[in-house]
Image (cartoon, rainbow, N blue to C red):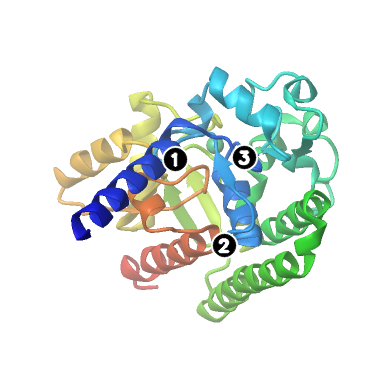
Amino acid sequence: MRKLFYLILILSSTVFLMSCTSTKNADIVTTAFPQYDFARAIVKDRMTVSLLVNPGQEIHKYEVTSKDRIAINQSKLFIFTSLEIDQWLKDPSSMAGESTIIMDLSTSFEEVHDDHLSLSTSNLEIDDHDHDHDIHYWVDPLIAIELIHAIYDNIILIDPENQAFYESNMEDYVEEIHELHESFETLIETSGWEERTLYFAGHNALGLFAERYHLNIVSIYTDFKPEQDTLSAEMISFMNLIKSSDTHYLMIEELIEPLVANKIVESLDKENYELQLLELHAYHNVSNTDFNNQETYASLFARNILHITLALTGGNND
Ligand SMILES: [Zn+2]
């Protein structure tokens, strides 16, 4: 009897694992981690949420499969990042089923940063300089809060019966992110970290995050897509910047093997200049480890705060 029970347990968990990896079918289908995390936080176990990219996979390199097309078609709510990031999604309406609500997350917030920068307008109308900046709009926690509200609005359209449950979950999650935001803002003010510089060996995804907290992030890449390598001239001038700033921390992005950062560390080590790598997460997607540990946008934001604190206190005496 006992053996039979264990056998059933093993079989059912195997089926569960298989269904997790082989299909993206769910009530809510998403194309990147932020909207996956936000939707999941609101619906908890009352609806299913899937993320088209697998943990550890880079969203800028994602290509849609026929199974994924079916998952989108059969979903009640499909949330994509933007036509620019999800370039495979040429015509979203053609992919939706009869009862699928399609949500372009990049048009779901109205946060305005500077006078010259109105993010509520279409991404396509923004000039090149602001463009790199805006494409990763979710990195600003106050925009994230707006996105959570917008996702909630669609969730209660597809399942109005559970509105009270969703609303309370939404409010809890917004509060969690807002508290982190306020504590980080206070930390920056009281520590005098405004306009301090972080050096980032990644693609330039954290512009709006830096702007929100008056930090200066100097990125080795100007393109929004990650590169495998870079010109040595760029690397040398970046290394010179690091040395002249006297920092001993170099920020790296999530999921990408830090080839260039490792080269910089090695090269500076020969000059007896010690440099440590610290991750600065831009939330595109999570690693397998972070996925298994059920990390969230909020917990990754908290980790970023920790790493920035280390970078700004650990290496400098000023
Ligand atoms: Zn990116």
Q: Is residue 173 left or right of residue 155?
A: left
Could you tell me the amino acid type at mark 3?
A: Thr
Location of residue 314 with respect to 215 vertically, above or below: below
User: Residue 298 lies in what quarter of the image?
Assistant: bottom right
Q: Is residue 231 above or below residue 36?
A: above
In the rendered view of the protein, which quadrant contains the C terminus? bottom left
Q: Which residue is mark 3?
A: 30
Q: Which amino acid, by three-letter code, is at mark 1?
A: Cys
Q: Along the polypeptide, which appears first: circle 2 or circle 1?
A: 1
* Mark toward the viewer: 2 or 1: 1
Asked if disc 2 and disc 3 are in contact, CB closer than 8 Å, the reply is: no
Q: Is residue 13 left or right of residue 166?
A: left
Q: Pinpoint residue 30: horizontal percent, then vertical percent.
A: 62, 39
Q: Secondary structure at mark 3?
A: strand
| Residue wearing tag 2 | 195
What residue occupies the far front of the structure in this picture?
1
Mark number displayed over residue 20: 1
- Earlier residue among tags 2 and 3: 3
Q: Alpha-carbon distance for marks 2 and 3? A: 35 Å
Q: Secondary structure at mark 2?
A: loop
| Neighbourhood count class around disc 1 (C-alpha, 10 Å): few under 14, some 14–19, many 20 upward | few
